[in-house]
Amino acid sequence: TTTGRVIEDIDLLIASTFTGDFLTPSVAALIQGKLGLPQSVGVVDMNAACAGFVYGLATAQAYITAGMCKKVLVVGAECMSKIVDYTDRNTCVLFGDGAAAMLVEHSPDNPGFLGFHAGAEGQSADRLYCTNLAEAMNGEELPIKRFLWQDGRAVYNYTIKTVPPAVKALTERAGMEVTDIDWFVPHSANIRMIQSIAEKLSIPMEKTLMSVVEFGNTSSASIPLAIWLALKEGKIKEGDILALYGFGGGLNHAGVVIRW
């Protein structure tokens, strides 16, 4: 309703999450049913952990560019409280539950997607995981079962090493400089990590949007929640350039540059 548009005329619903209740049906299907959307609406889940919402936006853009859809609803939703070990103070105090959505719509006269960049280091997959059907990875038994576990130092080092040059590569693909960005919206993992990334990119914290203070680390919901908070505060204006960058479990990262 905040867009002034009717949700019933979307073509596709993409849900970014890794905390769904079921292996099947998908969270997207459950949302479609809950909202009572027409049976003509396609539904699909995406699991890229904290980079998932960015991948969802990029996928929506791909469907629209290919002419297969005109309107795509992208939802980022996580219930982290279901998978944290409340006896482990290294993780349980960091995470929160949250959900947010963005509507991606065809606009021939005002394209909003300016660039995309992504990458991964699957060799380090066991540095951040939550088991499901398997309890071993790459032939090694995983010590923690059914709870989220991370090697905080390894994830931090990967992020600080990888994300700043990746953001520069993203802006280059968009045909611009980092200084052209009006708002930087990284995954809200924690404030220290965000400050380090912004410092390496020479982006002022005043131009960096976060949701971690209000909601904690909400994984794939953190980026759209940060944008929602900024919109409520009147920060983001039409025509602003936003660089969104997600990073986390995989280990993986992905970013998009969009014009609001």
Image (cartoon, helix red, strand yellow):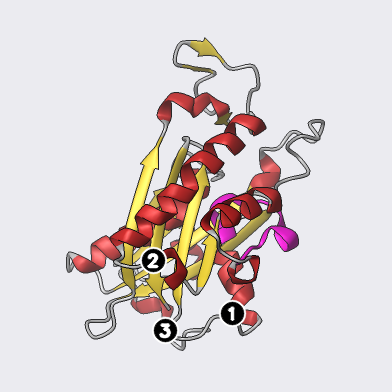
Q: Position of residue 78 (x, y in %)?
A: 59, 51
| Image position of 173 with respect to 93: above or below | below
**SS at mark 1?**
helix
**SS at mark 2?**
loop
Instruction: Read off the residue under disc 2.
Output: 177
Q: Earlier in the sequence, mark 3 or mark 2?
A: 2
Q: Position of residue 97 (x, y in %)?
A: 67, 54
Q: Amino acid at mark 1?
A: Leu
Q: Of the residues tagged 1 and 2, which is closer to the observer?
A: 2
Instruction: Read off the residue under disc 1.
Output: 231
For marks 1 and 2, give the CA distance: 24 Å
Q: Position of residue 74 (x, y in %)?
A: 43, 64
Name which quarter of the figure residue 150 lies in.
top right
- For this rendering, which residue is in front, 162 or 71? 162
Name which quarter of the figure residue 61 lies in.
bottom left
For marks 3 and 1, give the CA distance: 13 Å
Instruction: Read off the residue under disc 3.
Output: 239
The local crowd at label 2, few if under 14, some if 14 to 19, many if 20 or more residues have their Cα within 10 Å, is: some
Q: Amino acid at mark 3?
A: Gly
**Residue 96 appears in view:** no
| Image position of 253 with respect to 143: above or below | below
Q: Earlier in the sequence, mark 3 or mark 1?
A: 1
Q: Residue at x 26, y 74 (%)?
A: 70
Q: Earlier in the sequence, mark 1 or mark 2?
A: 2
Question: Which residues lie in the magenta part?
Answer: 209-223
In the rendered image, which quarter contains the C terminus?
A: bottom left
Q: Position of residue 34 (x, y in %)?
A: 51, 64
Give the residue at the far left of this rendering. 67
Q: Residue at x 70, y 47 (%)?
A: 95
- For this rendering, which residue is in front, 197 or 109? 197
